[in-house]
C-alpha cells in the first residue's frame, strides 16, 4: 500500500518537472494539465500515509515513530503531519494544490504569463518533492514491524493543534504561488493592473489561512501550555509572524499597483519575499539553529538543505528582480501626502517590523559569534515592534479617507485634534481613575480610535444609511479587518497589563481567594483515557452569585512518558478564570495540590480581533458581482 | 544517615512551602516582582522566562526576585544581581551597551528612517502632475 504512495510521490515529482519545463516554454494548457496530474497523484500518495496511520500499520517507520494503537482516530490522522517527514509531505501536497488551483482558476487572459507562473510553481514543487523523497522520506518501511508505536508527542494531541499545521501550511505555501506569479510577471516585464488583480487574489488566499493558523497555534499555547499567556515571542511563533507581516504589506501594496499601476517593482519584491520568509521560517524551525520551547525535528543536515533551497530560490528570484525591476512601468504620479504615500508608509513600517522580528530572533546567534551570549525576549519586542505598529495605526483613521495622487488636507487638523484629544482623555482617565500604566491607556485610546475611524469611513462613503449595504464587499472587508485590529489591540492591552496570576497550594476541602474568586478544592482523583491516565482536580469557583465547577487535569502519557496540563477555563463576560493543576506536595503530613490560577481579562477579544481580520480578508476575496 | 535524609527532606518541604503561594504583601511590589520574572530567563529551560517555568531553579530564582524586591531593590539592581550571577544570557531585555547592543536596539529605528527617506525620495521624483482621484472601492 505505502509503496503505491511512494511511487505516486515519484510520479508527482515527474509531473512537476514536466510542468516546470513545459510552463517555462510557454505551453499553458499542457503545463496546467501536468499541474493537475501532479496534484491528483500526490493526493493519492498522501492518502496512503493517512490510511497507514489510521490502520496503525507500524511497518511504516513514520507511523511506528509517531503513532499508537490507543490514540483516538482524529489524532492518528493528525499524527501524519505531527512530525518532520509527514509535515513535509503536507507541504508538497499544498504546493501542488496551489499549482492545480492556479491552473484551473487563473484569469488574466495572458497565456504565456500564466504558463510561466505554472512553470515556476512546477520548479518550486520539484524542489519540495525532491527534498521529501531524497532527504526526509515518510515512506520508509521497518522490518520487523514493531507491535506498538511510540505515540504522538502528547502536547500535540489536541484539536486546535491538529488543525493548526494544515492551516499554517496553506498560508506559508500559498505564498509559493504568489512568488511564482511575481517571477512570471518579472519574466514578462509586466507587473501591471492585470497582474496585480490576479496576484492580490492569491495573496489573500494565502493570508487568510495563515492568519487562522497563527491564531489556532496561539490559542493552543494559551490553554495547553498552562502559562496563561497567548504569545511568547518564541522563535517558532516569530517564524510565522514574519511572513504574515510581509503578506499584510503585500496586500496593501498590491492595491496601489492594481488601481494606479504604481509600486510595481516593490509589490513584486514583497511577493517574492513573502515566500522566502516562509521557507526561512521552515528552516529556523527545523534546523535546530535556534532554541525554542517547541523544538521540532532538529537535524542540521536537513536544515542545510532547506537553507540551500532558500539561497537558490532567493538568488534566482532576486536576480531576476534586479534585472527587470528598473524597466517596469512607474504608474501614475503621486505626492507623499496621498493615498499612495499613506500605503507606502504602511509598507515601510510593516516591512521594518518584520525585519525587527527577524533581527530579534536571529540576534542571539549573531552575538554568539562575537562571544556575547544575549537573550532577546518580550521586552525587546514590546519596546521596538509595538511602538512602530502603534504609530502606524494611529494615523490610519486620518489617512484612509485620502484620495489617490494628492490628498485633500482641509480636514486633517480636525482629525489630528480629535485623535490627540482622545489620547489625552484616556491618559488622564488611566492615571487618575483606572490606575493603569500609561502605555495601556494609550493602547486603549488607539483601539477605540481605530474602531471609530473604520466606522466613520463607512459612514463617509455611504453618505446615507440605505447605501451602507450597497458598499462593495472589498470596502466591508477593509473595514472589518481594521475594526479587527482595534478589537485585537483592546484585548491584547487589557490582557497583558491587567492579567492577574497567583499560586495556591490547597489540601482537599481547602480554599483560597484569587482576584475576588473564592476557589475550593473538592478532591483530586485519578481518571483514565484511551492512551493516558490523569489526576483530575475538582474545584468550585465562586464570585458574587456566580458559581463554576472547574476540573483542571494533569495527564500522563505512558507511551511517551510525558505529562501535559489540561487547563480548566471558565469564561465570564469580562475574561477567563484559568486554572492549571501543578504538582502534589506533602506538607506536614498533609497532601496539598499546587494550582496556578489566572484571571485573563478580555482574552476573547484577542481571538475575535484576529478572526475579524481573517473574515475581512475573506470578504475582500469574494469576486465582485458582475453587472452586465 | 536516615536522620540526615529526613532532615534534608524536611528542609526541602519547608523551602517548597515558603516558595509556593508566598506572594509579597504589597500588591505594587508583587506586580513589580512579576514583571521582573517575565524578563528573566530560566537558566535550565529552553527559552522560557522564570515566570512560566516549573523547573526547580526557576522557583528559586522567583523566590530570589521576591526577596530582593521586598527588600526594596530597584529593577536595575535586581537585573544586575542576576546578570552578575548567571551572565548576560539571563536578561530577556538585552543591554544597550557595546556594538551588539547598539545594533540590536538601533537597527529598527535606523531602518524606519531609511525606509521613510526612500519613500519621500520616490514621492518627490514622481510628484509632477499628481491629481486627486477618489478611490472607486478601496
Image (cartoon, coloured by chain):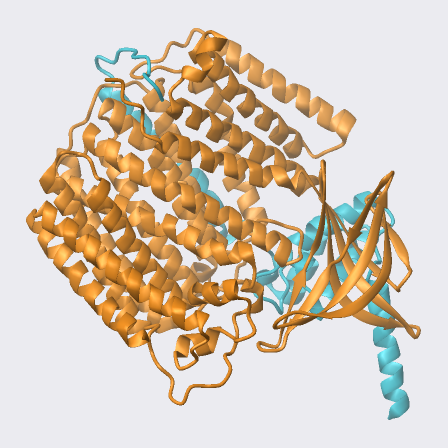
Chain colours: A orange, B cyan
Residue A326: percent from left, percent from top: 15, 35
Residue A418: percent from left, percent from top: 57, 14
Residue most extreme to the bottom: B1
**Which part of the image, by quadrant, shows the C terminus of chain B?**
top left
Left or right: where A20 falls relative to A521: left
Q: Please identify the quarter of the rendering in which residue A287 is found.
A: bottom left
Counting the numbered discs, the total is: 0
Q: Is residue A156 above or below residue A182?
A: below
Left or right: where A66 falls relative to A207: right
Residue at 65% across / 57% down in the picture?
B40
Quick check: can you spot residue A54?
yes
Q: Please identify the quarter of the rendering in which residue B55 is found.
A: bottom right
**Which part of the image, by quadrant, shows the N terminus of chain B?**
bottom right
Quick check: can you spot residue A354?
no
Please name whichever residue, A624 or A305, is drawn nearer the observer in this view of the structure: A624
Residue most extreme to the right: A588
Please name whichever residue, A373 or A185, is drawn nearer the observer in this view of the structure: A185
Residue at 31% across / 47% down in the picture?
A175
Please name whichever residue, B47 or A591, is drawn nearer the observer in this view of the structure: A591
Residue B134: percent from left, percent from top: 32, 12
Left or right: where A419 falls relative to A54: right
Q: Is residue A129 above or below residue A108?
A: below
Q: Is residue A339 above or below residue A278?
A: above
Left or right: where A591 falls relative to B60: right
Amino acid at each position: 500500500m505505502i509503496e503505491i504512495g511512494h511511487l505516486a510521490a515519484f510520479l508527482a515529482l515527474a509531473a512537476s518537472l514536466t510542468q516546470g519545463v513545459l510552463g517555462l516554454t510557454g505551453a499553458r494548457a499542457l503545463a496546467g494539465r501536468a499541474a493537475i496530474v501532479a496534484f491528483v497523484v500526490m493526493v493519492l500518495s498522501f492518502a496512503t500515509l493517512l490510511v497507514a496511520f489510521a490502520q496503525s500499520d507500524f511497518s511504516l517507520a513514520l507511523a511506528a515513530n509517531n503513532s499508537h494503537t490507543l490514540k483516538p482516530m482524529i489524532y492518528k490522522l493528525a499524527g501524519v503531519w505531527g512530525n518532520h517527514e509527514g509535515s513535509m509531505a503536507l507541504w508538497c501536497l499544498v504546493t501542488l494544490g496551489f499549482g492545480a488551483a492556479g491552473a484551473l482558476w487563473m484569469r488574466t487572459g495572458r497565456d504565456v504569463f500564466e504558463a510561466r507562473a505554472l512553470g515556476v510553481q512546477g520548479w518550486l514543487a520539484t524542489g519540495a518533492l525532491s527534498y521529501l523523497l531524497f532527504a526526509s522520506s515518510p515512506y520508509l518501511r521497518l522490518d520487523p514491524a514493531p507491535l506498538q508505536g511510540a505515540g504522538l508527542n502528547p502536547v500535540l494531541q489536541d484539536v486546535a493543534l491538529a488543525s493548526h499545521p494544515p492551516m499554517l501550511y496553506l498560508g506559508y505555501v500559498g505564498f509559493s504561488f504568489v512568488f511564482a506569479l511575481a517571477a512570471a510577471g518579472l519574466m514578462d516585464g509586466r507587473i501591471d493592473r492585470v497582474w496585480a488583480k490576479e496576484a492580490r487574489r492569491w495573496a489573500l488566499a494565502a493570508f487568510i489561512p495563515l492568519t487562522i493558523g497563527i491564531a489556532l497555534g496561539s490559542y493552543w499555547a494559551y490553554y495547553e501550555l498552562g502559562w496563561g499567556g497567548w504569545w511568547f515571542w518564541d522563535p517558532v511563533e516569530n517564524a510565522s509572524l514574519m511572513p504574515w507581516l510581509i503578506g499584510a504589506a503585500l496586500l496593501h501594496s498590491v492595491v496601489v499597483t492594481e488601481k494606479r499601476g504604481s509600486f510595481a517593482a516593490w509589490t513584486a519584491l514583497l511577493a517574492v519575499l513573502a515566500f522566502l520568509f516562509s521557507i526561512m521560517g521552515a528552516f529556523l524551525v527545523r534546523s535546530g539553529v535556534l532554541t525554542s520551547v517547541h523544538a521540532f525535528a532538529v537535524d542540521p543536515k536537513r536544515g542545510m538543505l532547506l537553507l540551500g533551497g532558500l539561497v537558490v530560490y532567493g538568488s534566482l528570484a532576486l536576480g531576476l528582480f534586479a534585472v527587470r525591476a528598473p524597466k517596469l512601468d512607474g504608474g501614475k504620479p503621486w505626492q507623499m501626502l496621498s493615498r499612495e504615500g499613506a500605503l507606502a508608509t504602511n509598507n515601510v513600517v510593516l516591512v521594518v517590523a518584520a525585519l525587527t522580528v527577524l533581527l530579534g530572533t536571529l540576534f542571539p546567534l549573531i552575538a554568539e559569534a562575537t562571544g556575547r551570549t544575549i537573550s532577546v525576549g518580550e521586552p525587546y519586542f514590546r519596546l521596538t515592534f509595538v511602538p512602530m505598529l502603534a504609530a502606524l495605526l494611529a494615523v490610519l483613521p486620518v489617512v484612509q479617507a485620502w484620495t489617490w495622487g494628492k490628498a485633500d488636507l482641509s480636514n486633517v487638523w480636525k482629525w489630528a485634534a480629535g485623535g490627540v484629544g482622545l489620547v489625552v482623555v484616556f491618559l488622564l482617565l488611566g492615571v487618575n481613575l483606572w490606575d493603569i500604566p500609561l502605555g495601556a491607556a494609550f493602547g486603549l485610546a488607539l483601539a477605540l480610535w481605530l474602531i471609530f475611524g473604520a466606522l466613520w469611513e463607512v459612514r463617509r462613503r455611504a453618505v446615507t444609511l440605505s447605501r451602507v449595504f450597497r458598499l462593495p464587499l472589498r470596502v466591508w472587508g477593509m473595514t472589518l479587518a481594521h475594526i479587527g485590529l482595534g478589537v485585537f489591540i483592546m484585548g491584547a492591552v487589557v490582557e497583558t497589563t491587567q492579567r492577574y496570576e497567583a499560586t495556591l497550594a490547597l489540601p482537599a476541602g481547602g480554599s483560597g481567594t484569587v482576584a475576588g474568586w473564592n476557589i475550593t478544592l473538592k478532591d483530586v482523583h485519578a481518571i483514565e483515557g484511551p492512551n493516558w491516565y490523569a489526576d483530575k482536580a475538582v474545584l468550585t469557583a465562586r464570585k458574587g452569585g456566580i458559581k463554576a465547577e472547574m476540573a483542571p487535569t494533569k495527564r500522563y502519557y505512558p507511551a511517551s512518558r510525558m505529562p501535559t496540563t489540561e487547563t480548566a477555563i471558565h469564561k465570564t463576560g469580562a475574561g477567563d478564570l484559568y486554572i492549571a493543576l501543578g504538582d502534589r506536595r506533602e506538607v506536614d503530613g498533609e497532601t496539598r495540590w499546587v494550582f496556578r490560577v489566572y484571571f485573563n481579562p478580555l482574552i476573547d477579544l484577542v481571538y475575535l480581533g484576529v478572526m475579524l481580520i481573517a473574515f475581512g480578508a475573506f470578504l475582500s476575496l469574494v469576486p465582485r458581482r458582475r453587472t452586465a | 544517615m536516615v536522620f540526615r535524609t529526613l532532615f534534608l527532606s524536611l528542609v526541602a518541604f519547608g523551602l517548597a512551602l515558603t516558595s509556593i503561594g508566598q506572594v509579597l504583601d504589597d500588591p505594587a511590589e508583587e506586580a513589580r516582582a512579576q514583571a521582573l520574572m517575565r524578563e528573566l530567563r530560566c537558566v535550565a529551560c529552553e527559552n522560557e522566562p522564570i515566570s512560566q517555568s516549573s523547573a526547580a531553579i526557576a522557583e528559586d530564582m522567583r523566590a530570589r526576585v521576591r526577596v530582593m524586591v521586598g527588600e526594596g531593590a530597584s529593577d536595575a539592581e535586581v537585573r544586575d544581581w542576576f546578570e552578575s550571577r548567571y551572565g548576560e544570557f539571563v536578561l530577556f531585555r538585552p543591554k544597550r551597551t557595546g556594538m551588539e547592543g547598539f545594533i540590536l536596539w538601533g537597527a529598527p529605528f535606523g531602518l524606519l528612517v531609511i525606509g521613510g527617506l526612500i519613500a519621500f525620495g520616490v514621492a518627490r521624483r514622481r510628484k509632477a502632475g499628481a491629481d486627486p482621484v477618489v478611490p472607486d472601492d478601496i
